[in-house]
Image (cartoon, rainbow, N blue to C red):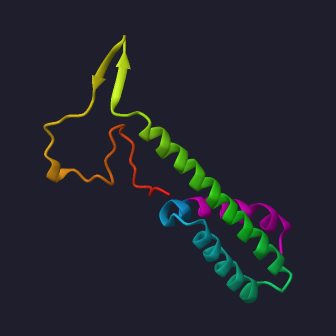
Amino acid sequence: MDLLLLLFALPVATIILASVLETLLHSPIKVAAIFFAIYLIVAFSAFDATFLIYVIVYTIIAFITAVITRLILRLINDNCDDDDNTITTNSATINTVNTTVNTQNIDNDNNSPCGCNTRYRRF
């Protein structure tokens, strides 16, 4: 097994894919379980038993990456909610909420007054 593959390519791929899966699944434990299952299958089908150590390490990396991604997305959503529908310029507060919007066409889960896409679930 190539050392560059074990120490660089697989960890980087794990970090990138764990971040993407976390944004889709919203559960660090599920992300880590998926990576554990995939690497376990790869360990027994393509490599020898020494790869099991790497399976555990890559699973921990996937879990940590998913938790960090979850925290970052939570911070982004919290900052988005702090805007409170107002813009302050030159001591004048302008209300940005349009009260004549047809409420039947509003999807409260996907629209945000600050312009952010808040599809990421609250914790």
Residue 89, placed above or below residue 99? above
**Residue span colored magenta:** 1-19
Q: Position of residue 17 (x, y in %)?
A: 60, 63
Q: Is residue 95 left or right of residue 42?
A: left
Q: Position of residue 45 (x, y in %)?
A: 72, 88
Furthest residue toward top: 90
Furthest residue toward bottom: 45
Q: Residue at x 69, y 60 (%)?
A: 64
Main secondary-structure element of the magenta-colored stretch: helix
Does the segment drawn in magenta span residue 24?
A: no
| Location of residue 11 (image quadrant) | bottom right
Q: Residue at x 50, y 57 (%)?
A: 123
Q: Residue at x 27, y 30 (%)?
A: 96
Q: Position of residue 52 (x, y in %)?
A: 80, 80
Residue 94, placed above or below residue 78? above
Does the segment drawn in magenta span residue 3?
A: yes
| Location of residue 66 (image quadrant) | bottom right
Which part of the image, by quadrant, shows the N terminus?
bottom right
Q: Residue at x 15, y 41 (%)?
A: 101
| Location of residue 53 (image quadrant) | bottom right
Q: How many marks?
A: 0
Nearer-the-camera pick, 44 or 123: 123
Q: Is residue 95 left or right of residue 26?
A: left
Nearer-the-camera pick, 4 or 39: 39
Q: Is residue 37 left or right of residue 119?
A: right
